Amino acid sequence: MKSKVVVLASGGFDSSVMLYFLIKKELTVYPLFVNYGQPYYAQEKQAIQKICKYLRLNLEEVEVSNISQLNLSDKNGFFPCRNAYLLLLGTIYASKIRANLLSMGIIKPTATEAYPDTSKSFLQDMQKVIDNSVKSKIKLFLPFINLSKNEILVFAYKNKFPFELTYSCYKGKAKPCGKCAGCRGRLDAFKLLKIQTLEQLKKS
Ligand SMILES: [Zn+2]
């Protein structure tokens, strides 16, 4: 039987490419989209719906938008405890459908995007919390954790992944602002890709 994996999917570049990567790994993929009151909810939702349609995945959505009453994302898109909260929601879903893996699009931190809740020690602690929270065994599976945005972009490019469907801007406008941390990370990767793609493609 194929392993089942629940994936926290935001419609952003990293988690969307990861959905594709996990399908290629022959896992049965269950994307979970969380409405936690993010200002860019509408754009993310539209993107993840398009991605799931393209990949023929059934999207599950959970609405917990009132947690934004307690706090809001800062200008860099950082929301306190977001990943812990999302991983626990993913654990709840994984234990229902008996998935043994739980995934999230965490990648190697970049200069523009380095959050405390993507560190290895945070993830080790979360694994312990998950182990002590549910009866079944659910393992965090983070295949992109040592990959840079550029390496993911090269993978997407080689596999003709439609990254134009994804959305990574923290402003929430239909047209990405090009200035926030989400946009900058993406643009930097594209710039690098132009220079390095041919070289990297030849190497791999
Ligand atoms: Zn932006």
Image (tube, rainbow, N blue to C red):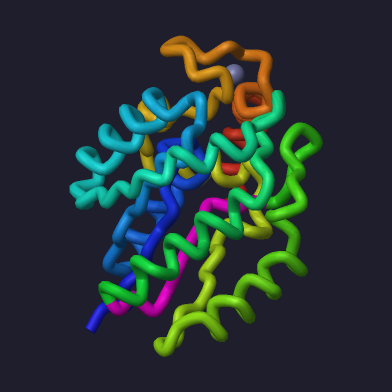
At 44% from the left and 69% from the top, the residue drawn is 91
At 46% from the left and 39% from the top, the residue drawn is 66
Q: Does the magenta stretch include residue 106?
A: yes
Q: Judge whether 51 appears above or below 4 on screen.
A: above
Q: Does the magenta stretch include residue 29?
A: no
Q: Where is residue 149 in the image (x, y as percent from the top left)?
A: 63, 41
- Please state which of residues 55 and 158 is positioned toward the viewer in this rendering: 55
- Please state which of residues 59 and 20 is positioned toward the viewer in this rendering: 59
Can see residue 158?
A: no
Q: Is 53 left, or right, of 111 in this rendering?
A: left
Splitting the image into 4 quarters, where does residue 177 fall?
top right
Q: Position of residue 185 (x, y in %)?
A: 66, 30
Can see residue 65?
A: yes
At 26% from the left and 73% from the top, the residue drawn is 97
At 65% from the left and 52% from the top, the residue drawn is 81
> Which stretch did the figure color magenta?
98-107
Splitting the image into 4 quarters, where does residue 201 fall?
top right
